[in-house]
Amino acid sequence: MNLLGSPHCLLALFTLLGTLASSALAGKILVFPVDGSHWINMKLLIEDLHHRGHEVSVVRTSSSWYVKEDSPHYKSITVTLPEPVSIEDQDYFVSFLNKMLKIQKSGGSPLAIMQFYWQMLTGLSQIHKEASQLAVEMFENPVLMQQLHEARYDVALIDPGLPAGVLVAHKLGLPTVFNVRWITSGEAHSVVAPSPPSYVPASGSVLPNRMSFIERVKNMLHYVLNACIDQYSVFSVYQELAERYFGPETSFKHMLQATDIWLIRSDFVFEFPRPIMPNFVHIGGFQCKPSKPLPADLEEFVQGSGEHGVVVMSLGTLVKGLPTEITSEIAAGFARLPQRVIWRHLGERPQNLGNNTRLVEWLPQNDLLGHPKTRAFVAHGGANGVYESIYHGVPVVGLPLLFDQFENILRLEIRGAAKALEVTKLDSQSFYAALQDVLHRPSYKDNMMRLSRIHHDKPAHPRESAIYWIEFVMRHKGAAHLRTESYKMPWYSYHSLDVLAFLLLLVVTLGGAMIFTTRFLCVRLCRTQKSKLE
Amino acid sequence: MNLLGSPHCLLALFTLLGTLASSALAGKILVFPVDGSHWINMKLLIEDLHHRGHEVSVVRTSSSWYVKEDSPHYKSITVTLPEPVSIEDQDYFVSFLNKMLKIQKSGGSPLAIMQFYWQMLTGLSQIHKEASQLAVEMFENPVLMQQLHEARYDVALIDPGLPAGVLVAHKLGLPTVFNVRWITSGEAHSVVAPSPPSYVPASGSVLPNRMSFIERVKNMLHYVLNACIDQYSVFSVYQELAERYFGPETSFKHMLQATDIWLIRSDFVFEFPRPIMPNFVHIGGFQCKPSKPLPADLEEFVQGSGEHGVVVMSLGTLVKGLPTEITSEIAAGFARLPQRVIWRHLGERPQNLGNNTRLVEWLPQNDLLGHPKTRAFVAHGGANGVYESIYHGVPVVGLPLLFDQFENILRLEIRGAAKALEVTKLDSQSFYAALQDVLHRPSYKDNMMRLSRIHHDKPAHPRESAIYWIEFVMRHKGAAHLRTESYKMPWYSYHSLDVLAFLLLLVVTLGGAMIFTTRFLCVRLCRTQKSKLE
């Protein structure tokens, strides 16, 4: 908005001054992050909050992989768990990926799908059992709990991907803000907003928003499956703790649903439009920023690509490398390109690597995607990378591997900004053909640029919005006016089934009574007439 | 947000510069307003758009009451209707109110309720039949339509309270923005967002958001009733025109639902939290602004109130006056107060008017509500006045008369910021007692101040947001990414009834087949065993 133009300048200034005045207090924030790529996001918010003068305390486990104990931006509260959380082991995802690739290779048979879900279910359950011990360790440490009580935090900022912090915040009576995309097996929206299965694809379904009848049947089954997974392999873990520490009447799900503000790492330039709630703030792409100049040697390599430009490939933080049979197909595909290629690859060096391809152990992804010579991005479809590609307008060749990556790439594909490949069916020819398509059919670049323009066109940068609403909760001790309490109703009341049953009963009773009366009167009348005739 | 603080200043500046660049174009906007108090709101947006350099054309009828032909801010397109729209006659609402008061007086009997709805239904149907002729007159004027086509507007800004403009915008192929709170008999949200009847009170139900079982039954019946009213007395009028001008396959409701952006004149500090959609922008209270000094004589009168302060009373633009038996009760109630009273009253002067009460034909409402001496506001509960009282933090004694006013006052009452009275049961004693309550129980002022603080605490002034999103639609030729197209599904598919029926059939068939097979096998087995034994 043109803050300098008249007559808005007065209004804008007024708003600005009001906000400056009300945000003057520096507060205290208790943070419960999730390790890995989630932490990269949370760290940005913590840095911003620190720069705004707030005192930030981060609860981490002693085995944490990414969340360091020492930081200029926060104080650590380190908790030692009886067993380290599996995902804090850097090799966990390598072996998990290999298992999953094996299942995917066996095709989409019902057995394979069941195996896939079983893997996920047991994996999830295991991780949550380990991670939930954070709450137990804290609750069983009266000195720590006393300190936390006395610290008088203003708000708990929680990534509820692993939601032990929700229990602790509840114990401390703190208002909460979630920095979230996924909770347990479901997308964050579905925990409090209505999600009509007719046009909101279930998490894990990899379905589009415009579904055929059969797709809608599949989607409904996915909803049921997700509800079962949530109930039996995730919520049950925390529900047990909720009952242990807060009494048998407590519902852990209600604690989640009572959150004041949901900072949702989604943006509708990417996510399918769907019902939302007034306390949702969409901050998808909040980590994106303009690119910086590349290191000299990389810049030289990139400039050497001439008019053809470069292709960038990275499969994210979790996956170190792919099996050799796949990487050699990728290398062969790249070798046929006139473009130069920068490939983040941590495994064995493929034998058939082309001269145009440089392997690196790490790459400045944001700076490369923002480079004017970059023509395409070969990506696994992790949310961070997807938003960076939208931010910089770089079309994508998708190689989804795990979790939400399939759905993320599907969303870009439906918008005509990406081409998806199945990693287990990949050969050099199909990979090369997909690259050619994305590099030379202008629709991919045009569509991605359109998404980029829309993504940039916001009243405020999503990072500003995130900080604004965290501070809002601190100023007003919550955001109750934005939050329904409808979740406290029994499910049959929430869905009005009791009302419908009552109305049906009423109609049947009244209808029955009318029929009975009419019949009775008819019979009487007939008899009278008969006796008259006789 | 502190736009000047580091490290946000860079981000903020970046966003600002991006927006300035992209909003550089001055565009053309076609406006379809609704007369009366709705126009007061629309006019503000038009003035802002004019100041932003856009060219605004306003479609008005020749009998328009408020929308003037000449304005420095817009060009008029005046259409003469065969019959003037009833509500453009200033006396329409006086006679309508009298009818309604008569019905209310007769109590809440089922007959009275049916009469009330019948009045509303016939009234609504009549108004829509008259107002819809706007589209007919325009479509049947090929010269005008040709001019409009050639003008190449960027967007149509429509108040769909009377939605003839939706048809015209569709004909011109324009993206649309609604400035809306009510469409036909329903609240705007319910046209595209899910509205669970278990916690979203239906328009006209005057029910709270936390309902008892019986209240939920009533609410469900109100939903059914509203759907019938919409279908038979409102939509049918426009549906006929849609079919006449766009062919038999056209759905007028789909045209409404396809709107790019809904600027909804609601704010959740006032409205109950409920599901919303990504293309909703809540601009409730966007007309509010800081108060200006009062005219000298009024300031003198106000200052003369000393420590007691003043009470302000106004019943809005539509209603000129109340029946004498009511005004004399009000006058008697006011006369007993130590406060001074400023009462906007256009009818007969009550005989028993106190010395402390000044009658005026018009009052600077916003400036009076923002005056530090103002202690309470006696209001009918029209949305504009409600937001002004929230903006300035003045508690309310509510005298709702028509339409949404009952529900508006109920919302303030539930939040502890207002006391509602039934105008037909009003006597001087109950009126005085209510005033005493609101003036002297601190909870009313405290609650209103809390609402006021929350209402002011926004990342941008709602008027800025409104302009931002109108220009967004102009820049991107719509906002398709924020809009579901789920409304295009048949109702049974939207509600997944076909999928549920199919799954039920599947379960029954499979179950039946299993029972049949088991039975068949058992019988075979028994026979074999029997024959063996024999």
Image: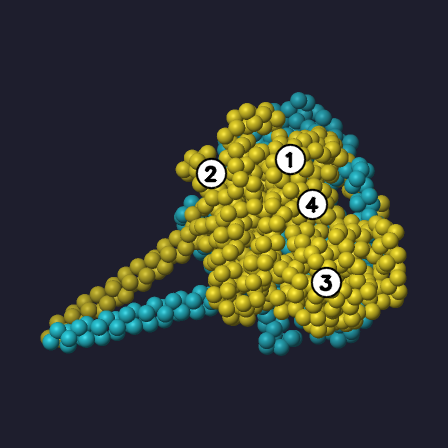
Chain colours: A cyan, B yellow
Residue B188, x across and y down, in percent: 58, 50
Residue assigned mark 1: B58
Sequence order check, earlier mark of 1 and 4:
4
Mark 3 vs 2: CB contact within 8 A: no
Reading the image, the residue beneath label 2 is B242
Q: Give the residue type at disc 3.
A: Pro
Element type at mark 4: helix
Mark 1, Cα crowd under 10 Å, few <14 / some 14-19 / many 20+, is many
Asked whether disc 3 touches disc 1, contact meaning CB atoms under 8 Å apart, the reply is no
Q: Secondary structure at mark 2?
A: helix
Q: Which residue is mark 4?
A: B40
User: Looking at numbered disc 2 in the image, what kind of residue is underneath it?
Assistant: Ala
Of labels 3 and 4, the one closer to you: 3
Mark 4 crowd level (few <14, some 14–19, many ≥20, 10 Å Cα)? some
Give the residue pinned by disc 3. B350
- Precedes in sequence: disc 4 or disc 2: 4
